[in-house]
């Protein structure tokens, strides 16, 4: 799917149209997240899994909107060391969430995919599929930039359905990988990519539907 770059003025229009919109402090507009939330909140009590570093205000906000929120601070696995010549490569550790099958309407992965070794992206996507209901959503970010040095995975604080704040954490720094949009789409087997938006800071927003 081609990336759609936001045009001038589009952010303000998206922000003003969100049903969960309230007067808030300055934050980063995110119309694609608002559209996903609008869909899941058609359910009487949607279940949301937040995989990022814990942000209590985000949990409180979603619960106030009527969601039942579970939090799992997923720690991305490191790359598997290369095998010595003549040895079989070691088996990578499984990626497993401590959550039941087909439980959630939405999984918020934030920027976790960028901290996964590229060869583990499909394993991660398969585990998200396991915990999502049919018709459930995955929402995440991925930076469109060259590989960088170690970074601390950030957390996201929701101010409104379409407004959030990216915050630093004190988590251990991890290597941040760079993946093309095409590689990410290939890794999301079992999903239908519903939107890819490119922010001005080169962060991509991915919204994907379990089909």
Image: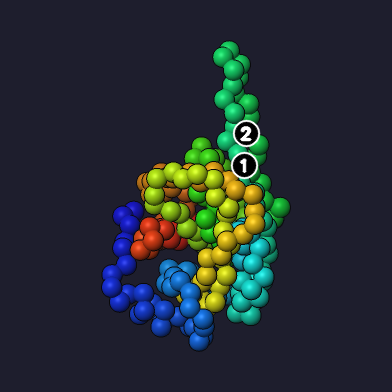
| Residue 134 placement: quadrant | bottom right
Question: Residue 102 placed where, x, y %?
Answer: 63, 57
Q: Secondary structure at mark 1?
A: loop
Q: How is the image coloured?
A: rainbow
Q: Which mark is residue 77?
A: 1
Report whether residue 125 is seen: no
Nearest the viewer among 14 and 26 is: 26
Counting residues from the start of the chain, the first of labels 2 and 1 encountered is 1
Nearest the viewer among 156 and 44 is: 156
Nearest the viewer among 191 and 113 is: 113
Question: Residue 126 placed where, x, y %?
Answer: 56, 47
**Residue under the image location 60 percent in, 79 percent down:** 65
Q: Which mark is residue 2?
A: none
Count of numbered badges drawn on the protein: 2
Q: Say above or below: 129 vs 50.
A: above
* Foreground: disc 2 or disc 1: 1
Report whether residue 90 is seen: yes
Question: Around disc 2, counting alpha carbons within 10 Å, would you say few (fewer than 14), some (14 to 19), or many (20 or more)?
Answer: few
Q: Say above or below: 45 vs 202.
A: below
**Residue under the image location 43 percent in, 53 percent down:** 143
Q: Say above or below: 185 vs 25.
A: above
**Residue under the image location 66 percent in, 63 percent down:** 54
Q: Which mark is residue 92?
A: 2
| Residue lying at the far left of the rendered structure | 8
Mark 2–mark 1 CB contact (< 8 Å)? yes
């Amino acid at each position: 799917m081609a990336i759609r770059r936001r045009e001038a003025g589009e952010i303000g229009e998206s922000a003003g149209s969100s049903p969960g919109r309230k007067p808030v402090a300055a934050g980063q507009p995110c119309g694609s997240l608002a559209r996903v939330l609008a869909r899941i909140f058609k359910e009487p009590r949607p279940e949301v899994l937040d995989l990022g570093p814990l942000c209590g205000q985000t949990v409180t906000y979603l619960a106030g909107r009527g969601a039942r929120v579970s939090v799992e601070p997923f720690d991305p696995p490191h790359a598997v060391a290369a095998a010595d010549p003549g040895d079989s490569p070691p088996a990578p550790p499984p990626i497993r969430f401590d959550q039941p099958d087909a439980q959630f309407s939405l999984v918020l992965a934030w920027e976790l995919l960028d901290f996964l070794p590229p060869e583990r992206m499909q394993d991660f996507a398969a585990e998200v599929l396991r915990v999502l209901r049919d018709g459930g959503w995955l929402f995440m970010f991925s930076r469109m930039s060259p590989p960088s040095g170690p970074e601390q995975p950030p957390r996201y604080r929701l101010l409104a359905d379409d407004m959030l704040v990216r915050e630093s954490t004190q988590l251990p720094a991890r290597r941040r990988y760079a993946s093309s949009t095409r590689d990410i789409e290939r890794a999301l087997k079992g999903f239908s990519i519903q939107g890819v938006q490119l922010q001005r800071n080169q962060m991509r927003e991915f919204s994907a539907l379990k089909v």
